[in-house]
Amino acid sequence: MNTKKEIKTTKKDKSPLVWGLVFGIVFGFLLQKGGATKYDVIIGQLLLTDFTVLKIMLSAVLTGMIGIYAMKTLGWVELYPKAGSVGKNIIGGLIFGIGFAVLGYCPGTIAGAIGNGYLDALVGGLAGILIGTGLFAALYPRLNRGILSKGNFGDLTLPRLFKVNDWVVVIPMAVLIFLFLYWLERAGL
């Protein structure tokens, strides 16, 4: 039989999943409202004729960066960045880029497009995610001993690299992103 402490711990452990689901639904809704689940918008981004996706993503980075570091400063969260490497960035970028260019969706926009009822996202996108994930999982042990470990830089972040307080990096980056978004809007892009 469960004790009160075990039940309380179980409920607490599920809380991040519930919040993740809620924020995922909100993010998907905003992607859809912003037009980022439309094939033409994605292809326009790839052809550098429509910057809707860039604006949405930079707005999300700006909001998330300020939010996560504010929560860290308040002691609400602790950050544990995953170790990275040049090899991981190259392989991840190639897989992401090929899927993005071939189908015209990224994983987040595939989910939104499926929600909109787009068959190409359901058939090509979901199948691509499942097949790609399966292949990567099967090849991971060999890749991890090879190319994924090349150029390992660990769990380095810019504040750690420069040995400064997080906000010394976050504030200038937030200002730069905001100014770039402002410029894109003013230029009509």
Image (tube, helix red, strand yellow):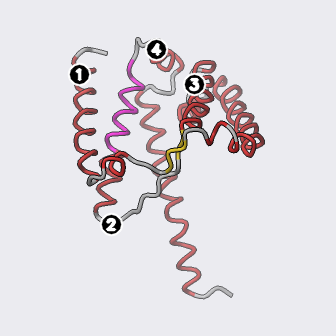
Q: What residue type is labelled 3?
A: Gly
On whether residue 56 falls in the magenta region, the answer is yes
Residue 109 in the image: above or below residue 102: below
Name the residue carrying label 3. Answer: 97
Residue 30's x, y, as percent? 42, 36
Residue 58's x, y, as percent? 36, 33
Q: Mark on residue 183? A: 1
Q: What residue type is labelled 4?
A: Gly
Mark 4 or 3, nearer chain start: 4
> Position of 115 compared to 167: left or right?
right
Of circles 4 and 3, which is in front? 3
The quarter in which the N terminus is drawn is bottom right
Instruction: State the separation of the CA atoms marked 1 and 3.
Output: 26 Å
Residue 61 in the image: above or below residue 80: above
Instruction: State the separation of the CA atoms marked 4 and 2.
Output: 41 Å
**Secondary structure under the numbered disc 1 in the rendered image:** helix
Classed neighbour count for the residue bearing mark 1: other residues with Cα under 10 Å, few (<14), some (14–19), many (≥20): few
Name the residue carrying label 4. Answer: 44
